Image (cartoon, helix red, strand yellow):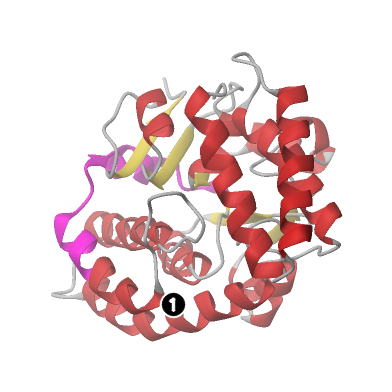
Amino acid sequence: MKMNPRCTYCLLSRVHFQSKLSTDDEDLISKTIKECLEVMTKHYSPEAVSASVATKVHRKCYEVLEDNDPYAVTKKLINQAAMKVLPAAKEKIYENSPDNGELFRRAVLASIVANYFDFGIMGFDASEDKFEAAFLKYFEQGLDVDDTPKMLGLLQDIVYIADNCGEILFDVLVFEIIKKLGGKITLVVRGGPILTDVTLEEIREFGIDKKVDRILTTGSNAVGVLIEEAPAELVQAMKDATLIISKGMANYETLSEHNFGPIAYMLLTKCECVAEDLGLEQGLSVAKLMNYP
């Protein structure tokens, strides 16, 4: 996905948000904003990939703050809140003993709804105390774009590209169904801390490494998956997969620039620009299969 003019102020809003997470020093926050503005000015272009520019800006932010993980505390709070809602999600998924197709659809829906739980997106309120109510509301609404019936026949060899902390605990519900149906899962997480994205640290903390067949990283702390920074093993795994599952908006922003497939984008259209790029409205629950014959 190419950069939209609206990406500029949204990105700077996030820089300000995470700077305040890191420090109370207003002079340092101002310096951080100034240097991030310079990076954006240098790299902004209608032809630039939005997440590539975001990566450069966030790396500069972390560098100036001298903080390699401003969201460290926030991620722990997200995981705690997600754990509280997980039992309700499981109950909803398995209610009335659904068949495999419906079971998969519900698990996918739960993992997409958990994509709601994010911090720092301008105009998007995902406070912890509102998560359970929001989860139940979105779950009852169901999927606005539902390609799960097509995905069901492609679950033999999955590359599952994760997104946020908290959300990953709901992704496990999808893993369980894929494994039940005989599929293999290569789980992909960020190669280093960036935003609230899940890393190997959280995967091991919750024992998620034992629930999949293989774990790879994106090779860096890039926003999304920058193929130029990705390990060869990951690129090959994506080429060999019967289905790539891409969670969240940042992964869409980067991977939509390539022709990997079949690929299922599973996300909430929290951002107007991402929604428009997908040809959809903002605020939808989406499981969209692309690059599929």
| The quadrant where residue 57 appears | top right
Q: Is residue 263 above or below residue 163?
A: above
Q: Position of residue 207 (x, y in %)?
A: 64, 80
The residue sitting at the top extreme is 47
In the image, taking residue 81 as reference, residue 44 lies left or right, namely right
- Looking at the image, is 185 positioned above or below residue 158? below
In the rendered structure, which amino acid carries the disc numbered 1? Ala
Q: Quadrant of the C terminus?
A: top left
Could you say where residue 73 lies in the image, as x and y percent from the top left?
A: 64, 78
Q: Is residue 60 visible?
A: yes
Q: Toward the viewer: 251 or 152?
A: 251
The residue at the point 44 percent across, 81 percent down is 81
Query: Which residue is depicted at the point 59% across and 27% down?
Result: 260
**Residue 147: within the magenta?**
yes
Rendering quarter of residue 39 = top right
- Magenta range: 136-160
In the shown orientation, is residue 27 left or right of residue 16?
right
Compare residues 265 and 268 and report the one nearer the observer. 268
- Membership of 268 in magenta stretch: no
Count the marks.
Answer: 1
Residue 40 lies left or right of residue 271; in this view the side is: right
Residue labelled with disc 1? 82
In the rendered image, which quarter contains the N terminus? top right
For the point 47% across and 23% down, the residue is 291
Is residue 193 among the parts visible in the rendering? no
